[in-house]
Image (spheres, grey):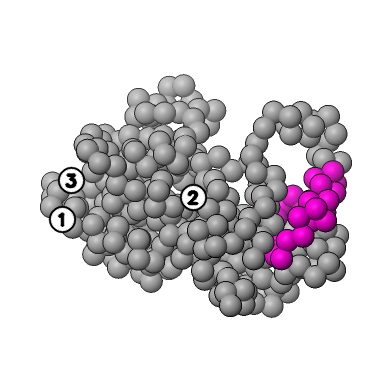
Amino acid sequence: MRFLLSIPGYTRTIPMGRFVEKALQELGHEVVVFNYERNSQLERAREKMGFKRFLKYKNRQLLELVEATKPDVFFTLYGKNHDADTVRELKRRGLPTICWWLDDPISLAHKYIEPSLYDFFFSNSRGTAAVYRHYEVKEPHYLPVGIDPAIHRPVEGAEQLYDIVFAGDWHPTRERVLLELTRHHRLTIIGPWKRRIPEDSPLRPFFLQVGYFTPTEMALLFNQARIVLNVHQWYQRWSYGINPRLFEASGCRAFQISDAKEEIPALYTPNEEIVLYEDARQLSELCTHYLARPEERARIAEQAYARTLREHTYQHRMQELLRVCGLDG
């Protein structure tokens, strides 16, 4: 089966598109990729044309690519670059249309696209299904992200150099949680926070890298961590919705402490494959407890790693997506 896969050019720390393309190929499908990478020529064109004209230009390019490559299926991540007329035209040409939205619950799809236009709409959050039904999506499907075992993996010979590692974008909630934790523990942080925190922020000494990081850089750091700390951007705002770090840390066989989300117990067994906190005020005590117990950390991390390889790779996700869409036959 030939997929036309549309990938946004703006994802940096979470380049799921590459993983989706690879997983589909590993399952035996042909993948034609549209809008694959950021590049200077594309950025200059957008600046010169203006955003609206640029999007029309990109959608014309997409339809030209459809004509040239004759795909069997159109599959987009996010779908922000494709207007309603383009999606309707793809459907008119007989292509099943699939959208996988990956910003829930913090940024809902209906603010940017018409999710009901797609034949199949998937979200990374189980808790947003009612919202999408309200916006006339007949059957919103829950599909979390996963790992690429070639990237998110244990690194042979890596030493645990850092007590507590956090990798991710800036958010005021994350800043507050990490600031409180530095009162009792030494952290190691990577992420694009440079323009978000003041020069004299108490967090600055804890940054190993103040900027965007690659999946490989993140995976190495997770291998070097005694504890990987996960703080969802929507901590204390929504009780549902899960981010990529949940799986990526476990894929690196790292011990992880995460804020609790409704979806997690079905993915990882609490206290056996992951440790959860309801309130960040528990974090200092939890970190002290597990830093003193390397064997317990190793046992939990090993069990999470085994579960991840069994159930949470991008191949698993694409198999489920194909099954739901009736394309696995």
Is 268 displayed left or right of 184 in the figure?
Answer: right
* Secondary-structure class at tag 1: helix
* Label 3: element kind: helix
Q: Can residue 179 be seen in this view?
A: no
The amino acid on which the numbered mark 1 sits, given as a three-letter code, is: Glu
Q: Residue furthest top?
A: 199
The disc, 3 or 1, on the residue closer to the chain's N-terminal end is 3
Where does label 2 land, which residue? 233
- The first of marks 3 and 2 along the sequence is 2
Read off the residue under disc 3. Answer: 291
Q: In the image, what residue type sits under mark 2?
A: Gln
Q: Tell me the magenta residue range.
A: 56-83
Secondary element at tag 2: loop
**What residue sits right under mark 1 in the picture?**
296
Q: In which quarter of the image is residue 326?
A: bottom right
Mark 3 vs mark 1, CA separation in Å: 9 Å
